[in-house]
């Protein structure tokens, strides 16, 4: 038995020997119970004696606790015993990589449960600066939207524009010691498909999933459990890529919890504490502290109708280090990844690029913007070359630039060098 396994066993034995106060259910409704006589606090986990059903305290009123259950509660009756269930951080080590688990660490891949590990407390202290650019395998990122070690970016997209495919590509190709993926509210076959794709690519990934049919408590817990696993791995000196798909479904789970607790809803119909929860999740990623590794984060956001003013999107854009917007119009014309370059931004630029690369990247953006300004004229056949040299260069570059944005990359330096050659080749008629 390894030392971490031994420490986890000691913790379990100490917990089993601790006196356990008992409360009783006094009122029931589907998915919700009122428990009296339990010395609980807001946010405590509980378990129904004998049934294994778990829940969380979401409200307190004159000694009675309102508990949101992990299921509907069929078969329960008033008088059933309820005990406090100790909470804890999800510990993870190298032996967890390649596995798929739920937020409590129980296996979802049909394999034996991974060996429990004692979770280290979250690291404290100041963070260092962002590290160097990471290889992503995608030219659009490596040239125009660099992802740096410890950076946190948002991936904003509507349904069906290639968001999940792009996240899979990043999980497979981004240069990192290991990958931790939080899947919130995804369908079972999508979880299994991602697991197979990563296994075939040999990716060192841990998936923490709460499927679409999971209770809201599990769905709201999944991203934070995955972040705890990422923190445990980074505490051992590993640089971790953290992916969350999607933060929007986390916000939806928070809303369900708020409704069950009788809390008033805030802007956009979200729980009043949702902005704080989203900010907390984002702030736990970043450059390493002390001897720990960095956690580089990509958080996906579902934006209905590509509305970037959606409350969830608005909160995250304010705290992240960049945003990548996927466009349905671009996807419909067959260019993938369907990144809208002019609406996307990496705040690591221009600092992370070499001085001689910055004018190349800026020129590429200028040409993309100039071509967009005359898009309608080009499509209608009204554009005539010769009126403006900069616009002419933009029009000549368009097809080559579109191909570049959908191409693979061997790294940031190679991508920028290829972009420079493309711009030079299309500069003159």
Image: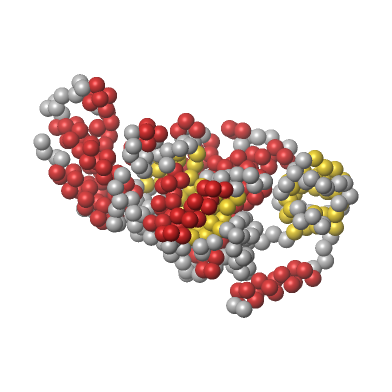
Give the colour scheme shown: secondary structure
* Residue 211 in sight from this viewpoint: yes
Q: Residue furthest right?
A: 79
Q: On the image, which quarter does residue 399 sit in?
A: top left
At horizontal 15% and vertical 45% (from top left) the residue drawn is 424
Q: Quadrant of the N terminus?
A: bottom right
Asked if 150 appears above or below 95 in the picture, the reply is above
Instruction: Determine the residue positioned at 68% across, 73% down.
Output: 9
The residue drawn where x is 14% and y is 44% is: 425
Q: Position of residue 72 (x, y in %)?
A: 75, 44
Using residue 281 as the reference point, say whether residue 388 is left or right of it. left
Residue 239 visible in the picture: no
Corner quadrant of residue 30 = top right
Of 231 and 245, nearer the camera is: 245
Q: How many marks?
A: 0
Split into 4 quadrants, where in the image is the C terminus? top left
Tell me residue 168's x, y (percent): 44, 51
């Amino acid at each position: 038995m390894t030392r971490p396994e031994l420490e986890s066993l000691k913790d379990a034995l100490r917990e089993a020997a601790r006196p356990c106060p008992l409360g009783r259910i006094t009122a029931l409704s589907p998915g919700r119970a009122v428990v009296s006589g339990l010395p609980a606090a807001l946010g405590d986990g509980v378990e129904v004696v004998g049934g294994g059903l778990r829940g969380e305290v979401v409200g307190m009123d004159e000694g009675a606790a309102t508990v949101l259950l992990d299921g509907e509660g069929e078969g329960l009756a008033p008088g059933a015993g309820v005990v406090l269930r100790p909470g804890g951080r999800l510990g993870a080590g190298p032996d967890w990589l390649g596995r798929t688990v739920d937020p409590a660490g129980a296996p979802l891949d049909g394999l034996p449960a991974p060996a429990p590990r004692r979770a280290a407390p979250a690291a404290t202290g100041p963070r260092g600066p962002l590290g160097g650019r990471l290889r992503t395998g995608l030219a659009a990122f490596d040239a125009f939207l660099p992802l740096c070690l410890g950076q946190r970016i948002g991936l904003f997209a509507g349904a069906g524009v290639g968001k999940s495919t792009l996240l899979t590509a990043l999980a497979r190709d981004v240069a990192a010691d290991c990958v931790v993926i939080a899947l919130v509210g995804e369908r079972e076959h999508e979880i299994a498909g991602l697991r197979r794709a990563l296994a075939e690519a040999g990716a060192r990934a841990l998936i923490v999933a709460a499927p679409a049919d999971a209770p809201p408590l599990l769905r709201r817990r999944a991203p934070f459990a995955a972040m705890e696993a990422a923190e445990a791995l980074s505490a051992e000196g590993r640089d971790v890529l953290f992916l969350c798909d999607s933060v929007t479904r986390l916000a939806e789970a928070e809303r369900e919890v708020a409704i069950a607790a009788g809390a008033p809803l805030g802007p956009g119909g979200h729980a009043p504490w949702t902005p704080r929860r989203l900010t907390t999740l984002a702030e736990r990623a970043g450059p390493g502290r002390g001897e720990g590794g960095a956690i580089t984060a990509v958080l996906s956001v579902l934006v209905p109708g590509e509305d970037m003013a959606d409350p969830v999107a608005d909160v995250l854009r304010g705290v992240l280090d960049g945003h990548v917007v996927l466009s349905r119009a671009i996807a419909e014309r067959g260019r993938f990844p369907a990144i809208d370059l002019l609406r996307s931004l990496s705040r690591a630029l221009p600092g992370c690029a070499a001085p001689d690369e910055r004018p190349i990247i800026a020129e590429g953006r200028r040409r993309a913007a100039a071509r967009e300004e005359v898009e309608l004229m080009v499509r209608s056949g009204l554009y005539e070359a010769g009126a403006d040299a900069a616009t002419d260069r933009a029009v000549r570059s368009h097809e080559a630039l579109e191909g570049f944005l959908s191409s693979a990359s061997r790294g940031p330096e190679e991508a920028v060098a290829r972009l420079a050659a493309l711009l030079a080749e299309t500069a003159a008629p």
